[in-house]
Structures are given as C-alpha cells and as structure tokens.
C-alpha cells in the first residue's frame, strides 16, 4: 500500500491542476458576462450558476490541496521511518 502514495499524490496534483484550470475558465466567462451590456434574466441566471460553480471549484481545489499535503507528509514520514528501520 505504501507504494501507492506517490501515485495518489500525482493523481491529486493532476486533479488540482484540472480544477484550477476550470476555475480560471469560469472566472474568464464570469468576467465576460459582467462586461456585457445585456442584463436579461438569462444572463443573470447563468452568472449566478457560474458563481456557485466557482465557489464549489474553489472548495474542491482547497480540499484536494489539503489532501495532497497530507499524502506528501505521510509519504515523507514513511520514507523517514523506513530509513530509520533500515539503519
């Protein structure tokens, strides 16, 4: 199981990168809507939906970053423990 940690960290880093890209794309779209002159109900609804998605993506990004940090720490601790046991 310990050999899976680097793969998990790599996978989570890829997920974080993907979420960050989605977040940037949504922010660009949001700015485009804010900059447009149309103030119809559809534009407002889309903006509210995207704002909710942005909040969700930010939360997921923070969650994955936290998980990545925990995995990296666990992996480092395992390496140190293994080195100590091998001495």
Image (cartoon, grey):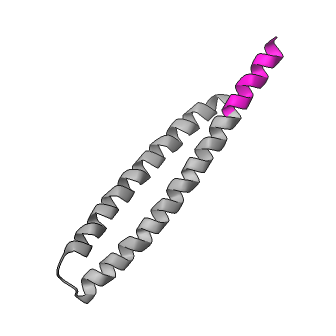
Q: Residue at x 30, y 69 (%)?
A: 30
Q: Could you tell me which quadrant the C terminus lies in? A: top right
- The residue at the far bottom in this view is 41
Q: Quadrant of residue 85?
A: top right
Q: Is residue 64 above or below residue 84?
A: below
Residue 26 in the image, given as x and y percentages of width and height: 33, 63
Decide whether residue 82 is among the magenta residues: yes
Residue 80 in the image, given as x and y percentages of width and height: 74, 23
- The residue at the far top in this view is 87
**Span of residues in magenta:** 75-87
Q: Main secondary structure of the magenta part?
A: helix
Residue 27 in the image, given as x and y percentages of width and height: 33, 63
Q: Nearer the viewer, residue 27 or 16?
A: 27
Q: How many marks?
A: 0
Q: Nearer the viewer, residue 58 or 7?
A: 58
Q: Tell whether 81 sits left or right of 66.
A: right
Decide whether residue 85 is among the magenta residues: yes
Q: Residue at x 31, y 58 (%)?
A: 25
Q: Residue at x 55, y 50 (%)?
A: 64
Q: Is residue 26 above or below residue 2?
A: below
Q: Residue at x 55, y 55 (%)?
A: 62
Residue 22 in the image, given as x and y percentages of width and height: 36, 56
- The residue at the far left in this view is 37
Q: Quadrant of residue 5?
A: top right
Q: Could you tell me which quadrant the N terminus lies in? A: top right
Q: Tell whether 14 sits left or right of 77.
A: left
């Amino acid at each position: 199981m310990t050999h899976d940690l680097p793969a998990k960290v790599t996978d989570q880093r890829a997920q974080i990168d993907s979420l960050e890209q989605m977040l940037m794309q949504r922010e660009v779209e949001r700015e485009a809507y804010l900059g447009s002159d149309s103030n119809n109900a559809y534009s407002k609804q889309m903006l509210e939906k995207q704002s909710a998605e942005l909040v969700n993506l930010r939360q997921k990004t923070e969650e994955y970053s936290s998980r990545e940090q925990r995995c990296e720490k666990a992996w480092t601790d395992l390496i140190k423990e293994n080195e100590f046991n091998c001495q």
